[in-house]
Image: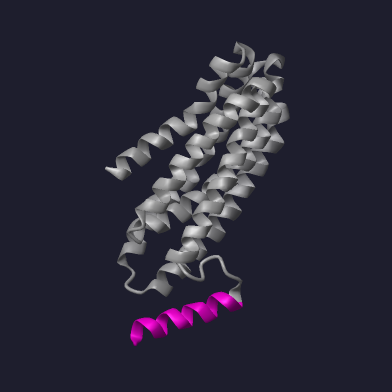
Amino acid sequence: MPLGVLALATIIYFRSGTIALSVVSGPAATASFAVASSAAFGLLMLPNAVAAGLMPRLAALPRLEQQVELVRRSLRWTFALSALLSCALAGLAPFALPFLFGDRYRAAVVPLVILAGAIVVVSTNTVLGTALLARGLTSPVFVQSLISLAANIALLAILGSLLGALGAALAMLGCELLGLALLARACGRGLPGLLALPHTAQTMGTAVHRGQVS
């Protein structure tokens, strides 16, 4: 049941910007955000693909330190690739949007750049959430999703009405950073050493291994 609610909350979350702007702002802002979010959310194929491959591999590893190392490698690659793709999208946005949709959608450029940055955080959160789910820790992911959704709705009501598409993009970025803080805290407990510095992570991994052996 929690996983079903989690999937529903995710769908609502990624569509909430367009829906909220149609209520609190005008059609121009709604159209601009719809274009910007459609382009940015296309980059979600990367973290979704990583999550699909990461879950079974984590489940097959018998030791916690092996799982932590796999998640750490996945985080590095996912962050690097998503940052590269997001930078490319942000760099192309000022030229591609007016060319494809006309000058009236030039207002979507800045929201798209902000959303491209948010996608890097989304990618990181996806890996962290997948790692927690693979460990059977569904509650932290469930709580994070509901808090992020509630915060997003509240920020959309405020920023969306004041700044239109720009406010909706800022709302999503803020909620993803909030989600990152919540997931990082949960991973600190469920996957010790994952987000520590290399020397600290090695020390913690050795301690965990000794604890399991004893």
The residue drawn where x is 49% and y is 54% is 183
> Residue 179 location in percent, x, y?
53, 47
Quadrant hosting residue 110: top right
Name the residue nearer the viewer: 114 or 164. 164
Q: As displayed, is residue 56 above or below residue 105? A: below
Asked if residue 8 is positioned above or below residue 87 in the image, the reply reads above
Q: Nearer the viewer, residue 7 or 74?
A: 7
| Residue 199, quarter of the rendered image | bottom right
Say if the magenta span includes residue 31: no
Q: Is residue 98 visible to us here?
A: no
Closest to the observer, 172 or 81: 172
Q: Quadrant of the N terminus?
A: top left
Which segment is the magenta one? 199-214
Q: Is residue 210 shown in magenta?
A: yes
Q: Is residue 151 left or right of residue 110?
A: left
Q: Position of residue 181 (x, y in %)?
A: 56, 53
In x, y percent, where is residue 82? 58, 48
Q: Residue at x 47, y 61 (%)?
A: 187
Splitting the image into 4 quarters, where does residue 17 fall? top right
